[in-house]
Image (spheres, rainbow, N blue to C red):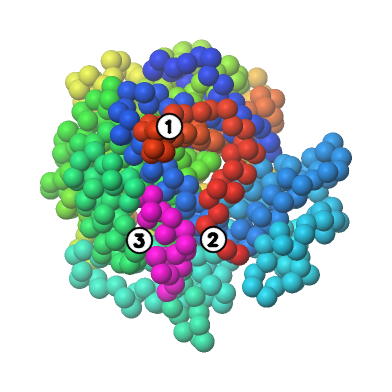
Amino acid sequence: MKSLIAAMLASSIALSASAVVDKNFDYHVDRFADIEVLRYEVPEFDRLTPQQRIMIYYLSQAAQAGRDIIWDQNGKYNLQIRKLLENIYTSFSGDKNSKDYKAFEKYIKQVWFGNGIHHHYSTDKFTPEFSEDFFKEQVALIPDASLPLQPGQTREELISIITPVIFDPTVMPKRVFQDGAFDVVVNSASNLYGEGVTQQEVEDYYNNLKDPNDPEPVSYGLNSRIVKENGEIKEQVYHLNGLYGPAIAKIIYWLDMAKSVAENDAQKAYITKLIDYYITGDLKLFDEYSILWTEETDGDVDFVNGFIESYGDPLGMTGSWESYVNFKNQASTKRTETIASNAQWFEDNSPVDSRFKKDKVKGVSAKVINAAMLAGDAFPSTAIGINLPNANWIRAAHGSKSVTLENITEAYDMASHGNGFNEEFVIDAPTSQIMDDYLYITDMLHTDLHECLGHASGQLLPGVDPDALKENGSALEEARADLFALYYLPDNKLIELGILDNPDAYKAEYYKYMLNGLMTQLNRIEPGKDIEEAHMRNRQLIAAWILDNGKKDKVVELVKKNGKTFIKINDYKKMRNLIGQLLAEIQRIKSEGDYDAGVALINKYAVKVDPKLHKEVLERFASLDIPPYRGFINPVMVPVLGEKGEIVDVSLQYGETYPQQMLRLSKDFKTLGY
C-alpha cells in the first residue's frame, strides 16, 4: 500500500537534506494550474553493472507499455480525448498568445498529469477555460485519418459525444465518488464498471464468489471490469487474450527481456510467474507471484508492475495499473533493515488489543530505493513509500516488502528550499528550529514505519471479510499505518537502535502532522468541497480526533497570533497517548470488520471542512505561491548499442520538457485502440 502521497507533504515544508545531492541539478520543469512538475535524479545509477542497467531499461519499457491502461481505467473517453488534444497541440498554427490557446495549453497539461480528464487527487473533472467554439474549430482542422474514431464512428458522432464530456460539468463530474449514502459505483466516472452496473450488483456478485472459510482468498475484482450483458453481471478480466490484451502483450515482451538479464534465479522465478499471471489473468498466480516477489530480497534491482492499488475504485477492489522501477540505496537501507529486523518487538509492544496482534511477524523486509522509472498510476504523481503485497493472508504467512523512495523525497526537498512555509505557518522559532533539524529524518522514518511495520501489523479475526469496510477501507487502513508510525516515533527504542540521536526529534513530525491534518492540506481543497481522497481523510481524521479528544487537557489547540491561526501542541506525551488510543480503536475496527464504527469515525472527523479556517489557509498559501501538488517527469533511458546493434549499456538523460515527454510517450507507447 502506498504511503502518504508525497505531493502533499513535500509541497509544504522545506526539509533538511540528509544525503549528498547535486546542487546544480535543475529540479523545476513546469508550473500550471495547481501543479508543479519536477524532475528527479537517479543517484548511484553509475555504480550498477551494465547488466543491471540493461535490466532496468527493459523493466522501464514494460512500465511505459502499460500507460494506455491507466488512461482507459480512469475514463472510457480518455484515450480519444488525449489523441484529440495532442493533435490540436502539435498542429496549432494560430495565435499562441490568445486567451483560448493559453487556456487550452493549461488544460492539456492538466489532463496529462491526471492521466485523464479528472484531477489526480480530488478526482473532480477539470474545467476547461477555453470555449467550445475554439475546440470545435480546432477539431475541424484535423484530417479524418488522424481522428481517434471508434469502428464505424463518424466525425460528427465523435464530437457530439466528446464535447459534453469535456465541457458539461454534470457529465462524469467525479472519477471516484465515495459518499456511502449514495451508490458509489453509479456515481463514479471511472471505467472500472460498465454502464448500468450498480453497487449492490457488484457486492452481490463478489459475495457469491467469496468463501468466508477460505484461509487464502484471492483478491477478488483486482484485475477485472464488471459489466452488464443482457441483464447479467459479468467480469471482463485483464489478461493477454482479454481486456487490455494488446498493452499486456507489450508488457509481457519487455518483462521477458528483463528476465533474460535478471540478477538471480529468484528474480527469474517471480518474473516468470508474473508473466504467467498476465497471460491467464488467474489471481491465484498473482498470489504466487506476490509470494515469490516478497521473498526475493537479494537483488539490487526491483520493480512493481501490475494492477495493484485500489484507491481508484470506490469499492476498493479493482487495482489501477502502475509500475515502479528501482534499485537499492545501499547506505540508507541500513536504517530500514534495522527497523524490519525488530518488527516483532514493535508488534508485541503495540497498544492494540492482543487479539489483533500477530503472534509471529513473518518476512518483513524493508529497503530504501532510488526510483529509476515511474509509470501508470504512479506517474506523474507518486508515493514516497510502498508496502506490498496487499493481501492480508500473504502478509501473515509470508511477510511483506517495504520500500522508501529516497531520491523522490530528496527531489521534493531540494525544490522546496526557501519557500517561506515555516515562517508563515509554524508557531514559533523553537518549533521551526526542531523542524529544520529533524523533519527530514523523522519524515523519512515516519514513511519507513508506516510502510514497513504499520501496514504489516495486526491481523483480521477469523472469518472477517478483507473488504468489510467498503468505501472507507482505504482511508482507515492508511490511518492505521500512520498511527502505528506516529506512536513509535517518540519511543526510546529508536534511540537504542541508533536511528535517532535526540529524544525530542519526533516533535518535528508530530507538529507537521497536526499542522498538515488540520490546516495546510486544505490548500488542496476547493472552497465549499468536502475531503474526498483517502490519504487526506486519514490525516484529518487523526488530527481532528486528537484535537477533539484532547481538548479537556488542551493537548493541542488552535490559537490566534497576529490575527492568524496556528497549531499549538502543549503536551507531546499526552498526544502520543491519544495516538495509541486511536490506533487501538482503528485496529479493532479493521480486525472485526466493524463497518458502522468506521463510517462513524470517517463522517465525524474526516470529511467536512471548517469554511472559515479553509478560507484563511487558502489566503495564506496564496501569499506564498506554493503549488498544492507536485509530480515528476522521468529521466530518458538511452540504450548504448554494440557493434552488432545489441544493447550493451544504458545511459540517462534529463533534458526533456514536460510536453516533450508526454508527446513522446503517446507516440512510442500507444498500445490500445479507441
Q: Residue at x 54, y 36 (%)?
A: 633
Crowd around label 1: few <14 · some 14–19 · many ≥20 (10 Å): some
Q: Quadrant of residue 525?
A: top right
Q: Earlier in the sequence, mark 2 or mark 1?
A: 1
- Residue under label 2, please give it: 672
> Which residue is outermost to the front?
644
Disc 2 element = loop
Inspect this view and state whether residue 480 appears.
no
Amino acid type of the residue that numbered disc 2 sits on in the rendered structure? Leu
Residue 374 placement, left or right of 576: right
Amino acid type of the residue that numbered disc 3 sits on in the rendered structure? Tyr
Which is in the foreground here, disc 1 or disc 3? 1
| 601 is higher (above) or lower (below) than 242 | above
| 314 is higher (above) or lower (below) than 40 | below
- Residue under label 3, please give it: 278
Asked if the magenta segment contains residue 243, the reply would be yes
> Residue 81 at x, y = what percent?
67, 57
- Count numbered badges in the picture: 3
Q: Earlier in the sequence, mark 1 or mark 3?
A: 3
Disc 3 element = helix
User: Is the Cβ of the residue at disc 2 closer than 8 Å to that at disc 1?
Assistant: no
> Residue 314 at x, y = what percent?
49, 61
Alpha carbon distance from label 2 to label 3: 16 Å
Q: Earlier in the sequence, mark 2 or mark 3?
A: 3
Amino acid type of the residue that numbered disc 1 sits on in the rendered structure? Val
Q: Residue at x 56, y 21 (%)?
A: 26
- Residue under label 1, please give it: 640
Q: Residue at x 20, y 69 (%)?
A: 214
Provide the residue span drawn in magenta: 235-255
Crowd around label 3: few <14 · some 14–19 · many ≥20 (10 Å): many
Asked if the magenta segment contains residue 50, the reply would be no
